[in-house]
Amino acid sequence: MKHLLTLLPALLIGMAAQAQQRNNMNEQTKAAEVAVWDTYVTRKDGRVMHFDIIAPSSQRDTAVIHGYGRAYLESKGEGGQSLTAKECRFCHVRVLQPKWEADIRRQGYFILEMENCD
């Protein structure tokens, strides 16, 4: 029994360290997740642009997301086109890809061009 009592503090410390490590891993996983907002906007020439707005998963404010989309449309000469919840909707959460990270750190989002984004 005495031997067991001497091991108990070490066991408890080890269990606490494992719990902290799990918490750290969960935080790292959350930090590496992004939200994908599926977006379809009718261009001035009538074609439909399809692109994804990729932002940190913690960013759920649609006004901010739509602002990102409008900035992108401006950069493509398509400013003023409608971009609302009808054109841009949350789709899913996925793991951050390294090629998106610099843009997300710099401007808060990444645009994944899919169709008619020329």
Image: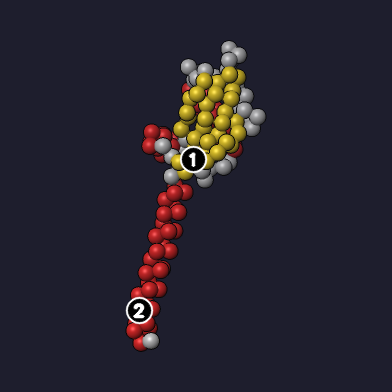
Residue 101 visible (yes or no)? yes
Cα gap from disc 1 to disc 2, whole angstroms: 43 Å
Looking at the rendered structure, the kind of residue marked 1 is Arg
| Residue on which the image places disc 1 | 94
Residue at the location (41% across, 34% down)? 100
- Do tag 1 and tag 2 residues touch (Cβ < 8 Å)? no
Position of the N terminus, as image quadrant, is: bottom left
Looking at the rendered structure, the kind of residue marked 2 is Leu
Left or right of 81 in this view: 11: left
Circle 1 residues within 10 Å: few <14, some 14–19, many ≥20: some
Query: Helix or strand or loop: what does disc 2 sit on?
Result: helix
Quadrant of res 14: bottom left
On the image, the x and y values in percent for residue 51 come to 52, 26
Circle 2 residues within 10 Å: few <14, some 14–19, many ≥20: few
Residue 75, placed above or below residue 102: above
Q: Which of the marked residues, 1 or 2, is nearer the chain's N terminus?
A: 2
* View extreme (bottom): residue: 2
Residue 67, placed above or below residue 117: below
Left or right of 16 in this view: 66: right
Residue at the location (58% across, 19% down)? 48
State the mark number for residue 7. Answer: 2
Residue 35, placed above or below residue 75: below
Quadrant of res 3: bottom left
Left or right of 115 in this view: 24: left
* View extreme (top): residue: 45
- Viewer-proximal residue among 105 and 19: 19
Residue 105, placed above or below residue 4: above
Residue 64 visible (yes or no)? no
On the image, the x and y values in percent for residue 118 come to 48, 17
Left or right of 62 in this view: 99: left
Residue at the location (44% across, 58% down)? 23
State the mark number for residue 80. Answer: none
